[in-house]
Image (cartoon, rainbow, N blue to C red):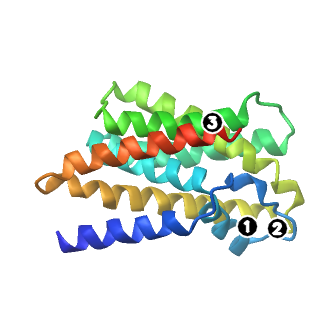
Amino acid sequence: MRRNCLVALAAIAALAIASPAHAHIIGASGAGLTRGFSHPFSGLDHILAMVAVGLWAAQSGRPAIWVLPVVFPLAMACGGLLGVAGVPVPGIEAGIAASVFALGLLIAFQAKPPLALSIALVALFAVFHGHSHGTELPQAAAPLLYGLGFLAATGILHLIGLGIGSVMRIPGGMMALRVGGGSIAAAGMVLFVGL
């Protein structure tokens, strides 16, 4: 229980120091692996969405607990390739805000749709996140390394969400998780207002 509290406190601290700006407004110019790895931690929208994927996966149980955190980076990479290729995807900013809002609601209401629907939702949200960052990759000094760093950091944020999600095993933990989901959804609404 103490370890779960420490993980939760570390996640809250990471959220508190992140800037409220969208993660993708920081350019990738001159970037490589280190910049790609640090970039996801610079925007609240990306942090909240990635942690929420882990939280929802933990709340959903098997097989979602391992499927969703794998699907997201794969679909995000596909969205990134669309961005690199210059393929337009409408509503990127709204899609990113919607991902934070919807994932928060899914956690708050303990939604457990069929796995195929969960995968489709997570993949759709990932395409928006990936596309917004993929448009930066051509500017990077080492695009492949930047992308790999970005994907690794995304995986770590998923793991943080999975770790926080383990609080549901303690008394009152599920309620805390649901309140956290509501808070994430509220942050998603703030992101919408900021568009």
Could one spot residue 29 in this view of the protein? yes
Q: Position of residue 156 (x, y in %)?
A: 48, 63
Q: Position of residue 159 (x, y in %)?
A: 41, 60
Q: Residues within 10 Å of mark 2 (few under 14, many from 20)?
A: some
Q: Earlier in the sequence, mark 3 or mark 2?
A: 2
User: Looking at the picture, does residue 190 appear above or below residue 32?
Assistant: above
Q: Residue at x 77, y 38 (%)?
A: 82
Residue position marked by numbered label 3 in the rendering: 192
Kindly identify the amino acid type of the residue bearing the numbered disc 2. Ala
In the rendering, which numbered label is found on residue 62?
A: none
State which mark lies toward you, 1 or 3: 3
Residue position marked by numbered label 1 in the rendering: 145
C-alpha distance separating marks 3 and 2: 32 Å
Q: Residue at x 89, y 59 (%)?
A: 139
Residue position marked by numbered label 2 in the rendering: 142
Helix, strand or loop under label 1: helix
Could one spot residue 67 in this view of the protein? no
Residue 118: name its quadrant. Answer: top left
Q: Residues within 10 Å of mark 1 (few under 14, many from 20)?
A: some
Contact (CB < 8 A) between labels 3 and 2?
no
Contact (CB < 8 A) between labels 1 and 2?
yes
Q: Position of residue 112 (x, y in %)?
A: 30, 30
